[in-house]
Amino acid sequence: MWRIISSSLTLRSCVSLAMLVALAAASAAAQGPNPLSVRAVRFYRADGRQTTVKAFVEVPAQLAEPIGPGRTDSVRYQVSLKVVDSAGVTLHSETWGKSLLNEPGASGVDIVEFLVAPGSYRLEATVLNEAGQQKARATVPVEGFTSVPAASDLLLSPLIRQVGNATDTVPRAGEFHRGDALISAAATLHLTPLRPQAYYLLEVYNPGELDQTGTMQVSVLNEAHKVMTRTQPAPVRIGPGGGLLKSQVDLEGLPEGRYTMTVAVDLGGTVVERSADFTMAPLAATVARNAELTSVALTTDEGFFAAMSEADLDSAAAPLSYVAKSSERGLLRGFDKLSPAAKRRFLVEFWRKRDPDPATQRNEAREQFYGAIDFANRAFTAGGRAAQTGWKTDRGRVYIKNGAPDDMLKRPSSNTLPYEVWRYTHGRSRYFLFADRSGGVGDYNLLATNDLNEPTQPGWREILKEDAVQDIGRYLGVDFYRDAASPLGN
């Protein structure tokens, strides 16, 4: 029996489980080369007296290749996996390809499950290039249990979570079920000073018909076999058939290095021990990589909106009416009824369609738009009783849609009303005339323009009076009283 039970997990940086796992992958990169990593964890299957093997194949992004010419945001890898018996006979082989984002410390993790009878086997994993040539290879021996074992192999994970309720039973990408636990896959557990929690899982088998009671104790040893930390014995009870033991150890303060975790279960004087290796990253490299990952995450559309609260998402969506197409405005009107996850998906998709260069992680259109929002809020916020946030004002709207004017006429203290004229000379020539009719609190209204997408107020010349109209005409090179055909001559 053979099946790949999870799709590739892209180890990304965002405020979630993905961030924790990405930091773990980054810690491996900080300690040296990140080669192809493979681990097999064995569980006993009593009904068929067989061994269930969970194999984790972790492929770092540097072993993958770009997707298509000019693409730098994603990479793709291809893995060939074989199970070979002691006589050298290939019992099964499988090849698959996956893609992942090309980000710092990124890896793809595939979970493979298969059954073997008692005996000796070899698990071979090979990363191939597009031509089918070998780029990296790893081999792991596997022994099928010949009888009921005392326990499974020890499994270490960056996160093990309890199935919370009936709706929280589906594994996320990179997770798999074991009992009532959802386990995040890792070929090797890489801890960091920012994420020092090690999760572990062990199945203990009880062939008898009565409960067995005893204790469980966890030890961490360094490469010199010195005990660095040891937990107090905790009581355990194993029912007929067996039981699942799982918990976590906080290893904050553990120095950089390679370690072995040993879980010892004492049941009536019979001690069962199982061990697995893990690493702890150096603090300085972890902090530097964390900053790099965070920067990359906020650069992408997904990371930019993932870091926002629901209130922030609503604020990010509000000004989109300035640039939304007619087909999108109906969706915007119902934005407040969406869940936070749906709001994020809407915003990511909205800006994905406007990305001028999808081959890069940055979206310059989104950055320019929200940069303009920020500037408008600082420069054009109006005071007084009818105070308005800068992006909601007429000047803010024109700035967000058109950018900064190429030149400007400002008359903050004219004989009539303070006014400004913005002129755009690049592309299609455009003019915008604003006047402060608020009594000096900075609320400049748009009075006249030659932009057909913006309104011109009837009788604007009477509002400003002749001296101001002549002043504006000289600046724009238009006589608004003689040139009736002028875009502003109404």
Image (cartoon, helix red, strand yellow):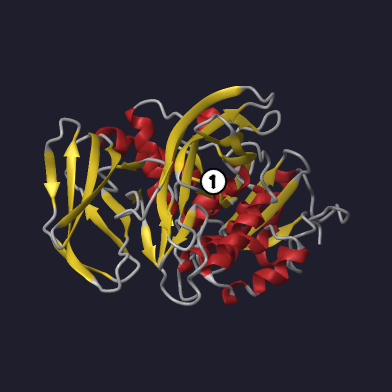
Location of residue 488 (image quadrant): bottom right
- Residue 306 lies, in percent from the top left, at 48, 56
Report the quarter where the C terminus lies. Answer: bottom right
Which residue is at 52% across, 32% downward?
A: 124
Residue 64, quarter of picture: top right
Determine if residue 416 is in view: no
Name the amino acid, label 1: Thr
Of 11 and 141, nearer the camera is 141
Tell whether 253 sits left or right of 383.
left
Q: Which residue is mark 1?
A: 300
- Badge 1 element: loop
Residue 286 shows in the view:
yes
Does 228 sit above or below residue 131? below
User: How crowded is the residue under tag 1: few (<14 C-alpha within 10 Å), some, or many (20+)?
Assistant: some
Position in image of residue 240 (x %, y %): 32, 71
Q: Is residue 136 left or right of residue 210?
A: right
Q: Nearer the viewer, residue 91 or 177?
A: 91
Q: Is residue 484 placed above or below 190 in the rendered structure?
A: below
x then y, percent, for residue 346: 62, 62
